[in-house]
Image: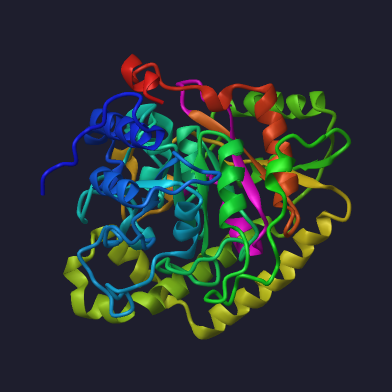
Amino acid sequence: MNSVSHVPPGSDPVEEAIERSRRVCGQVDDDLGILVTPLHDRALRSHRADPRGGPLTGVTLGVKDVIFESSAPASAQSDVRLAEWPEGQPEATAVSRLKEAGAVVVGKTATMEYALGVQDGSGRGPVSRNPWMTDRWAGGSSSGSGSGVLTGCFDAALATDTTGSLRIPAAYTGTTGLKATRGRVPTTGTYPLAPSLDAVGPVAGSIDLCARLLQVMAGPDDADPVAPDVEAGDYLSALTADVSGLRVGVDHLTAYADGGVDPAQPAVFERALKDLDTLGMRRSAVEVPGYQLLNVVGNVIMLAEAHEIHHDALVRDWARYGRGARWVFTAGESISSRDYLRAQRLRATLSQQVQALFDHVDLLITPTCHLGAPRLDGMHPLDPSTYLASMHTTAWSVTGHPVAVVPAGFTGDGLPLSLSIVGPYWREDRVVAAAAAFQSLTDHHRQRPAALSLATQESR
């Protein structure tokens, strides 16, 4: 198919945004493995045929390749096709809402196979790399999301998050991620990994754009039984809300940094806390109840549910899965029904205990990870501890609380470190307010690798 002709400067802001995305993706994608399917030509044709205006007009969007979007098939970056993955699947509700508001989908983004496993080159599609150091992981499973946003390949990404799949890439690439209360954003049209944990949300260069995307996506959906009949909050007003006086509970989680702590991380975290003090927030030390058990519960639930979904395909198409996906999906076979039910009961109890913390504080603050992005050559597909050690995302998927991940500084060798801001159920506005105030005081989210060319930075 012939490429749609490029547009001259000054002709149409949406077309200019698409062409800017095309230029930047062309500069960085070969090295970073961001896109599974570029959609710039289709985006131009769609815009010319049906130009849409709205609060997101001209925002370019990457969509994770486990989320259905009408202009391209979703491959889940796998050679395996599942019976429950029909080609005629309706477009994801979140995607449709973003497009109706004017956002333009410019590509399907890289993921770990069916949103799990390791990108070790044994499966289909690109291995995503980190723009800060290309021998490092970009995070996962929404692997192309953070790198694509950081480089300006697109303005924002629509990702999924089961035990951190959205927040890990945001943390490792120095971008901003927002996971709302489970159910706030419909998952309709998204292939499930672990249905009782799955969420959909944005990655962007700032909490400002994340909030604008959430404002459009959030709200009830008759096709999603998890999405409650509760209208979205006012996330745009939250961007300028007064945060002075907010009570902030802080847990350093150092006792759970099983993979170690980067020498720079304690000072980075303490500097971030002092910034919150400057903003007038009142902090106190807290301990997240049952934190270690929350991680165990999350892994049991995820593995059991993922195995149930993939069981028949694993029997039928074992060799067509990549090594990492085969291992992780098969691991769930060892989990009994008793294990699973017990994990769900513990989940309910622990979630209530975490929610009770918010009777005494307005927000919780923790590190997102105590380490920077790991080396790709050190990530073994049969040993997740090589790339998830000292990462702190699973607990908030188990409890379902809203959380924003915001850049907070750098390791000694120049890799991003991040802060997690956790709120009570349905109070995404409070999370957004704190993240926006922090980003108004700091510039960590504006930092870009020196290796990015001047032309690429100017294209943003």
Front residue of 430 and 281? 430
Q: Is residue 106 above or below residue 354?
A: above
Residue drawn at x 77%, y 46% is: 363
Q: Looking at the picture, tell me which residue is in the foreground, 76 or 331.
A: 76
* Quadrant in which the C terminus is drawn: top left
**Does residue 410 appear to the left or right of 349 in the view shown?**
left
Left or right position of 89 against 103: left
Residue found at the very far left of the displayed protein? 1
- Residue sitting at x 47%, y 37%: 172
- Can see residue 165? no
Residues in magenta, as a range = 388-415
Up the image or down, 428 lies above or below 171; here it is below
Q: Quadrant of residue 24?
A: top left
Give the image location of residue 81, x and y in percent: 24, 72
Rendering coords of residue 144 (x, y %) = 36, 44
Q: Image quarter for residue 441?
A: top right
> Is 275 situated above or below 314?
above
299 relative to 12 in the view: left or right: right
Indicate left or right for 320 with 223 as reference. left
> Is residue 344 among what the camera can see?
yes
Residue 294 found in image quarter: bottom right
